[in-house]
Amino acid sequence: MKDKVIVGYVYSILNSQGNEMLLMSSFGTTRTKAKKNFNYQNQQRLAPVKHENKYLVHVTVMEEV
C-alpha cells in the first residue's frame, strides 16, 4: 500500500481558538460516507459541533509502520 494515493472527502470544524481544523475521522471516499462518518463522530461528543466546510483531499501513504 506504500505510495498509494487515496482520494476522499473530509469535513472541517472550528476549534476553541477559532482556527479551522480538518476532522480526519470524518474521511470518506464519497460525500455521503464522509457525512455519515461525521455524524457518527458527532454523536460520540459531549457537546456536538457544527461542520464548517467540506474538502476533497488526496491522502498519500508514505510508509507502513
Image: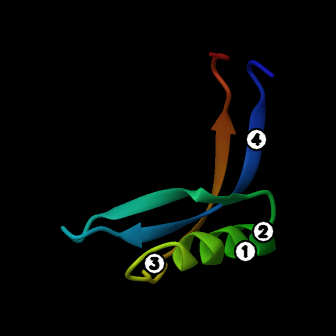
> Which residue is identified by label 1?
36
| In-image side of 32 versus 49 (left or right) | right
Q: Secondary structure at mark 3?
A: loop
| Mark 1 vs mark 3: in front | 1
CB under 8 Å between discs 2 and 3: no
On residue 47, the disc is none
> Which residue is identified by label 4?
6
> Which residue is identified by label 2?
33
> Which residue is identified by label 3?
52
Q: In the rendered structure, which amino acid carries the disc numbered 4?
A: Ile
First reached walking from the N terminus: tag 2 or tag 3 = 2
Give the vertical position of 64 relative to 45 (above or below): above
Q: Badge 2: how crowded within 10 Å, few (<14), some, or many (20+)?
A: some
First reached walking from the N terminus: tag 1 or tag 4 = 4
Quadrant where the image shows the N terminus: top right
Task: Work out whether residue 65 or residue 8 is closer to the camera in this orientation and state it.
Answer: 65
Q: Secondary structure at mark 1?
A: helix
> How much space separates mark 2 and mark 3, taking CA atoms?
17 Å
First reached walking from the N terminus: tag 4 or tag 3 = 4
> How much space separates mark 1 and mark 4, taking CA atoms?
18 Å
Q: Secondary structure at mark 4?
A: strand
Residue at left offset 69%, top offset 75%: 35
Q: Badge 3: how crowded within 10 Å, few (<14), some, or many (20+)?
A: few
